[in-house]
């Protein structure tokens, strides 16, 4: 990912944060665009401390649901980094897309940490666990890598097998 620049909307926390961290670890420069600029700045600082020394990670405040906001953050990426190679619309449509299953984040905590609800839900996931933001970030890192250069118009489902639609017995039965 060296010499590549990634813009990630909704990159301050959860799946977007994991994608930003992964791409930065892989050597890409990253611009995190998020409505919560304080969290985005904190995330950028934390990722910078843990990433490739050559990688730059910066943050910009933006509400990408507003008309014109996406064009504004793309322009910001071009001004700050002089190029843009990877655009991750964390909640939008792209040429290739990732369809995550239930990912354990602060937004899903009420389900993933509830013993009864999680037990029932996990019976539907052959992998036997909830996904993590890093699981999604790994799939995205693949889709934006040279290894996926011949993949276009694809939805990569990252759900531990849940879409198979088959309930699996729990390990305690």
Image (spheres, rainbow, N blue to C red):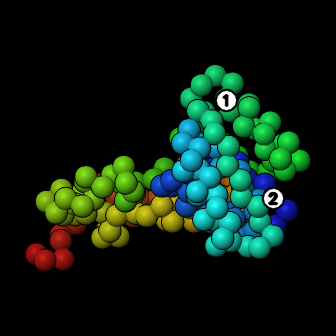
Q: Is residue 83 visible?
A: no
Q: Nearer the viewer, residue 53 or 137?
A: 53
Q: First in sequence: mark 2 or mark 1?
A: 2
Closer mark to the observer between disc 2 and disc 1: 1
Residue occupied by mark 2: 4
- Apparent side of residue 74 relative to residue 105 in the rendered image (left or right): right
Characterize the local packing of mark 2: few (<14), some (14-19) or many (20 or more) Cα atoms within 10 angstroms.
some
Q: Residue at x 74, y 32 (%)?
A: 72
Q: Quadrant of residue 1?
A: bottom right
Q: Secondary structure at mark 2?
A: loop
At 83% from the left and 47% from the top, the residue drawn is 80
Residue ID at (18%, 77%): 171
Identify the disc placed on residue 69.
1
Q: Position of residue 13 (x, y in %)?
A: 51, 53
Please give left or right for residue 95 compared with residue 116 in the image. Answer: right
Residue placed most toward the observer, 4 or 143: 4
Q: Nearer the viewer, residue 136 or 151?
A: 136
């Amino acid at each position: 990912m060296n010499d590549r620049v990634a813009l990630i909307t909704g990159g301050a926390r959860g799946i977007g944060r994991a994608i930003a961290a992964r791409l930065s670890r892989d050597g890409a420069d990253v611009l995190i665009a998020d409505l919560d600029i304080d969290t985005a700045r904190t995330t950028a600082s934390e990722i910078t401390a843990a990433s490739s020394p050559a990688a730059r990670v910066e943050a910009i405040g933006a509400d990408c649901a507003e008309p014109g906001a996406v064009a504004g953050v793309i322009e910001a990426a071009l001004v700050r980094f002089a190029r843009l190679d990877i655009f991750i619309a964390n909640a939008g449509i792209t040429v290739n897309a990732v369809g995550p299953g239930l990912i354990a984040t602060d937004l899903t905590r009420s389900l993933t940490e509830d013993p009864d609800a999680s037990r029932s839900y996990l019976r539907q996931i052959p992998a036997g666990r909830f996904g993590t933001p890093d699981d999604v970030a790994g799939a995205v890192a693949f889709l934006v890598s040279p290894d996926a250069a011949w993949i276009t118009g694809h939805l990569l489902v990252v759900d531990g097998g849940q879409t198979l639609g088959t309930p699996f017995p729990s390990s305690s039965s």
